[in-house]
Image: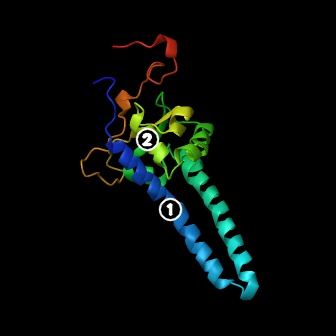
Amino acid sequence: MTGSRPGLGVVGRRLVQFLLDELLVFGPMLLLAIAVAWLFRPHGPGLLPFLEVVLYTMLALDLVGLWFVHAWWPYRHGGQTPAMRWLRLRIVTLEGTHPSLGAFFVRELLMVVDGFAWGLAGIVVMLVTRRRQRFGDVVARTVVVRVPRSAHQAAFPGPDGDFGAVADAQLALGRADVGLDRGHRHHE
């Protein structure tokens, strides 16, 4: 069926993937911050400035970690973050090829927009776009696709058995499909 939209299940799976990747980065950072604060805590009036330094250092390391997991890691590992591998999802260009590091960087940079209002902006954009793309995907010209199940790749099956992302056969998009050719759209 040409031109059909992916199911809403992909939005839920992408949210689960995002939360797993966030935990992968934030969990160790939080444990490190707690350990540093507990081991090196000063007593008296120097406690508050010390905790501020720990907090800001943790936030800076968290941003570096998020860039690593959401941009560098998928660039070097076939378009998949660790959680995307577990959930059998992959980031590809609209043409079905591996995105450039710049495309991954744009996706991560625009997480500022997609993450607005605790991620509600990104969820709404995914719900209304034809290929269930968030704003970062639209600008970077990427899409999240399902990775076919294979014997050598472990994955957690969804309750419906279908991961709901765009199948590879449905990936080829024309200019009208992504709204780049506004004056020459063909309506079927």
Give the side of residue 116 with respect to residue 83, left or right. Answer: right
The image shows residue 182 at horizontal and vertical percentages of 50, 16
Which residue is at a point 52% across and 20% down the rendered structure image? 180
Which residue is at a point 35% across and 28% down the rendered structure image? 169
Q: Quadrant of the N terminus?
A: top left
> Which residue is identified by label 1?
24
Single out the residue that lies furthest toward the bottom: 43
How busy is the neighbourhood of tag 1: few (under 14 within 10 Å), some, or many (20 plus)? some
Single out the residue that lies furthest toward the left: 160
Q: Quadrant of the C terminus?
A: top left
Which residue is at a point 41% across and 45% down the rendered structure image? 89
Give the side of residue 57 with respect to residue 178, left or right. Answer: right
Give the side of residue 154 with respect to residue 102, left or right. Answer: left
How many numbered discs, if any?
Answer: 2
Coloration of the structure image = rainbow
In front here: 26 or 44? 44
> Which residue is identified by label 2?
124
Name which of mark 1 and mark 2 comes first in the sequence: 1
